Image (cartoon, rainbow, N blue to C red):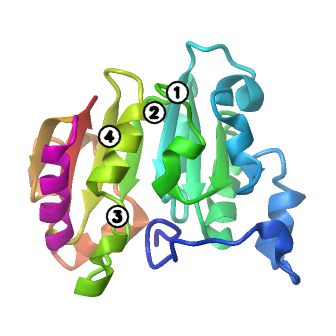
Amino acid sequence: MPSAMSRGAQLKIGKTKNIPKPNEYIHSMYHEYSSYCLDEEMAPQNKGHWRKNQFGMGSEAFLDLEIGTGNGYHFAHRAQCFPERQLLGIELKYKPLIQTIRRAVRSGCLNAKVMRYNAVHVDQIFAPEEIHDVFIHFPDPWVKTSQKKHRLVQLDFLLRLHQVQKKGSRVEFKTDNKDYFLDAMEQIQKSPYHIVGSTMDLHHSCWSKTNFITQFENLFLREGLPIHFALLEK
């Protein structure tokens, strides 16, 4: 299931290098997958230079972003299907971070990297108009009234995200939580984004044929629950 800025993660994070007893995933982050992982201190150092620093690409290369990669099925699928596009993933928890990049690397992807960072602050790690398409699949709905302020898709975040995306780029948003979706749509309508389309039931819509079903998404489908979807464009 998604974690980090997805399911149940805290908004404040400490520095990985300060953890006294690193677990196996942190160890993998700095050793086995050190060429593919960036911690919360490394990530901001690439602001404005992700293509050159991390992929050895020019300024015209496509650079996409997945926020909350979870176990990495969509991430690996995306990297495999679009090898001409570079893909970054943001996670907070170490296990899904490593699961994600491991899945991509073992699939032979050379165009994917992940970072540990709080996605709320995308403007701290990306320069204006630095990235292209963004995927936000099943972010934490923070269902309690007192927690709703922690939801990712809010106006302030949307304004920051809009700033770092290139014109014509898109945002794909999916959630199983109806309340969150309706609340998010209100926030989106206040933002500069153009709503290309939306639906309260993705799998009975015109977007169903091109939709990649994540492992997490499949759990809801088995229960007959609808998936809410919105496609935005800068």
Q: Is residue 101 left or right of residue 227?
A: right
- Occupied quadrant, residue 47: top right
Which comes before the other along the chain, label 3 or label 2? 3
In the image: residue 19, left or right of residue 155: right
Question: Residue 228: x and y, percent?
Answer: 17, 59
Which structural element holds mark 2? helix
The residue wearing badge 4 is 171
Residue 72 image offset from top left, x and y in percent: 54, 58
Find the distance from the CA under tag 4 to the CA under tag 3: 13 Å
**Residue type at the position of mark 4:** Val
Counting residues from the start of the chain, the first of labels 1 and 4 encountered is: 1
Q: Residue at the location (27% across, 52% down)? A: 155
Amino acid at the residue labelled 1: Glu
Number of residues whose C-alpha sits closer than 10 Å to that of mark 4, classed few (under 14), some (14–19) or many (20 or more): many
Q: Which residue is mark 3?
A: 138
Whole-number angstrom distance, CA of label 1 to CA of label 2? 6 Å
Disc 1: CA contacts within 10 A as few (<14), some (14-19) or many (>=20): many
Q: Residue at x 34, y 21 (%)?
A: 167
Do the numbered discs 1 and 2 sit on residues whose CB atoms are within 8 Å?
yes
Q: Nearer the viewer, mark 3 or mark 2?
A: 2
For disc 2, the marked residue is: 164
Question: Quick one: quadrant of the C terminus?
Answer: top left
Question: Who comes first in sequence, dot 3 or dot 1?
Answer: 1
Residue 233 percent location from the top left of the image? 25, 31
Task: Name the residue tied to disc 1.
Answer: 130
Compared to residue 19, the image places residue 15 above or below, namely above
Query: What range of the chain is rendered magenta?
Result: 179-192
Among the two numbered marks 4 and 2 on one chain, the one whose residue lies closer to the N terminus: 2
What is the spatial separation of the Cα atoms under label 4 and label 2, in whole angstroms? 12 Å
Towards the viewer: 163 or 137? 163
Q: Dot 2, crowdedness within 10 Å: few (<14), some or many (≥20)?
A: many
